[in-house]
Image (cartoon, rainbow, N blue to C red):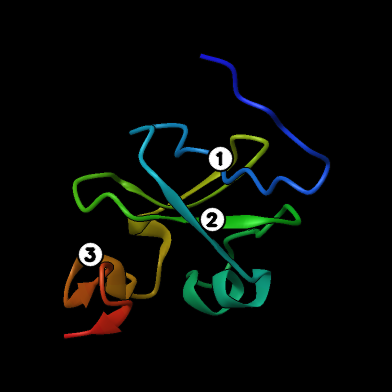
Amino acid sequence: MIIELTTNSKVIPACPICHGIGQKVRKITVEHQVKEGIKVEGEEFYLCKTSQCDVAYFTQGQKTILQEQLIKNPYLHSGYNSSLNTLI
């Protein structure tokens, strides 16, 4: 199988822990979700969409922010239907 990549390809990295699909989010989103004192480093953040994973957010550089480091768990792990992109 040959995969052709172009300079316009947008590749979303997999979670470094569970290897599940991620969803790009803005840094400000992550900053508003973490507990006080948690340093948010990186430029591009991704939301881990695997409900059993301990990772909430990750970067291409393999940095992670765990569920336990959040003020509250993000909507994806409870009450979020990713196929509809809506809260349920």
Specify which label sits upstream in the sequence, 1 or 3: 1
Specify which label sits upstream in the sequence, 2 or 1: 1
Q: Distance between the residues labelled 1 and 3?
A: 19 Å
Q: Which of 80 and 41 is in front in this view?
A: 80
**Quarter location, residue 3:** top right
- Mark drawn on residue 13: 1
Say few, some or many: other residues with alpha carbon within 10 Å of mark 1 (under 14 / 14 to 19 / 20 or more): some
Residues marked 2 and 1 touching at CB (< 8 Å):
yes
Q: How far apart are marks 2 and 3 (CA)?
A: 14 Å
Q: Which residue: 47% across, 32% down? A: 16
Q: Which of 13 and 45 is in front in this view?
A: 13
Say which amino acid is labelled 2: Tyr
Q: Where is residue 54 in the image (x, y as percent from the top left)?
A: 30, 46
**Quarter location, residue 87:** bottom left
Residue 22, placed above or below residue 69: above
Q: Name the residue under label 3.
A: 77
Q: Mark 2 points at which residue?
A: 46
Residue 30, placed above or below residue 42: below
Say which amino acid is labelled 3: His
Q: Which residue: 57% across, 46% down? A: 12
Q: Which residue: 19% across, 46% down? A: 52
Judge from the rendering whether residue 34 lies leftward or rightward of residue 87; answer left or right: right
Judge from the rendering whether residue 16 lies leftward or rightward of residue 74; answer left or right: right
Secondary structure category for the residue under label 3: helix
Residues marked 1 and 3 touching at CB (< 8 Å):
no
Label 2 vs label 1, nearer the camera: 1
Specify which label sits upstream in the sequence, 2 or 3: 2
Residues marked 2 and 3 touching at CB (< 8 Å):
no
Q: Position of residue 84 (x, y in %)?
A: 27, 76
Say few, some or many: other residues with alpha carbon within 10 Å of mark 3 (under 14 / 14 to 19 / 20 or more): some
Say which amino acid is labelled 1: Pro
